[in-house]
Image (cartoon, helix red, strand yellow):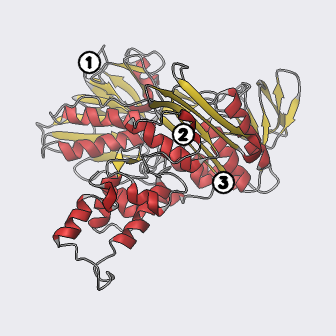
Amino acid sequence: MSGDMSGDSNAHRVVVVGHGMVAARFVEELQTLAAPGAVAVTVLGAEPHLPYNRLLLSEVIAGRANINALTLPAASEPVVVRADTTVVSIDRAAKAVTDADGVVHDYDTLVLATGAEPRVPLPTSDLRGVRTLRTIDDCRDLVAAARPGRRITVLGGGLLGIELACGLAHRGADVTVVHRTPTLMDRQLDAASARVLADSLRAQGIGVLLDVEVIDVVGHDGAVCGLRTAAGAVLPTDLVVASAGVVPRTELACAAGLPVEHGIVVGAGLRSPEDPAVAAIGDCAQEEGRWTGLLAPGWEQARRLAHELAGRPVRASGSADGVVTLKARGLSVVTMGTAGGAGRTVTLSDAGAGRHVSVEVAADRVVAATCIGAPDLAADLTAAFERRTPTPKDPTHLLFAELPTGTGAGQGADRTNLATMPGNATVCRCNGVTKREIVGAHAAGDRDVEAVAARTRATTGCGGCASAVEGLLAWMEEVDPPSDTRPANATPLSTPVAADAHATLGAHPSQGSP
């Protein structure tokens, strides 16, 4: 049985396996770029849902997002989307994939966007009570399971593990984080900053056990009742949530004889070196020996592949080492760059206040920083890092005075910072959306975050920029209210003065054009 392909019979047939965030972005980009009738796209997604923002599932558990609001825009005709469809095999010689129902889908280009699955560092067990967070269904299960007094162990003290712990604790559960190394978030934090983070979690009533290796689960009446450690202790628990990273889903590629290492091996053009008719993007892809497991690089891959298939190839956009933001109730943690010790490092640590800031400067630029419990300073340091703004001659000033960038794009940004933020300052790092684009969306009539997201994609990544977007919209309502509410003495937007103000994005007159 053969599956129907949309579009003209002469169209280039593209089959996408997977319908997560990266696949959805790829299809959206390709629809926008390709000439009408040039491509015929079929998307095969294993989940029964429309694509959704997986990164915000922890926000749903924390009660700061609605699960129904995570859905991403659906692909429009002539794209064919088949949800709840699992691909079981790839026939590279015939250029076709077969799904679990026996339907065959022919392709000219096959795009593997199969993503990754949670790693569960426990022996295989039939016991009830071991969960992960990767899908909407996982999220619903955890929300239902998190109730006051229930003992929940989060296995893994990385970024997602801490977000989960804070969200579950907010719902009243008795939460303990168990981490196998001596430092939380060990991919981002050094020992000193990790200690402050651990103390901050404990101050919220969350247990933290470090340097503990869990080797087995203990059950009673078919359900988990504890975890056994390498030291022989048993940690009592009613529910275990494994948050120990993810593993790329490469089974289809392996079975088809494609090169696979940690992920599906692809070159600079995102094609398999073994078969140029097969591409891979997102969490399942390992591009030129590098696998990140991050969303922004996946979206960048989607953009490049869509441009290439549309006959409009673009280069990969270079970027600095990433900025990592922890989205957790009651915590503010931001890290950026990679500390290498080549420059000068200044540190402020105040464990009693839950605050730790460390900044490394080289060649008068911020090359790395860690900010815990200092959201306003984190926003300014992020701007300085991303825009390579010159730093003060004495780097200790970075810890106490507002930086000259004046972005204030993070949590706690005030209206003065928003006014002086340069137009090209990045507000949404996941999607590269600037202040200029958000102000432009407001000028076009977008008055809430959802409308701005639909136009610019801001907030549709990790969601960490939502407060900044809300602040910008509130500020724009003050400086440029809708015409029906504009004060009588306000300068009409059509006048040269007002037009120039919009050209400079509402910046304070002393700031000039961004």
The residue wearing badge 3 is 143
Report, in whole angstroms, how far the alpha carbon at label 2 lies from the one at label 3.
41 Å
Report, in whole angstroms, how far the alpha carbon at label 2 lies from the one at label 1.
60 Å
Depth check, front residue: 324 or 134? 324
Q: Is residue 365 above or below residue 239?
A: above
The residue wearing badge 2 is 398
Report, in whole angstroms, how far the alpha carbon at label 3 lies from the one at label 1.
46 Å
The percent coordinates of residue 512 (x first, y second) are: 28, 55
Identified at 12% across, 46% down, the residue is 36
Q: Furthest-bottom residue in view?
A: 488
Task: Tell me: 477 left or right of 502.
Answer: right
SS at mark 1 in the image: loop
Q: Looking at numbered disc 3 in the image, what kind of residue is underneath it?
A: Val
Q: Looking at numbered disc 1 in the image, what kind of residue is underneath it?
A: Ala
Task: Tell me: 467 left or right of 350.
Answer: left
Residue 508, can we see it? yes
Say which of marks 2 and 1 sits in front. 2
Identified at 66% across, 54% down, the residue is 143
The residue wearing badge 1 is 93
Q: Furthest-front residue in view?
A: 393
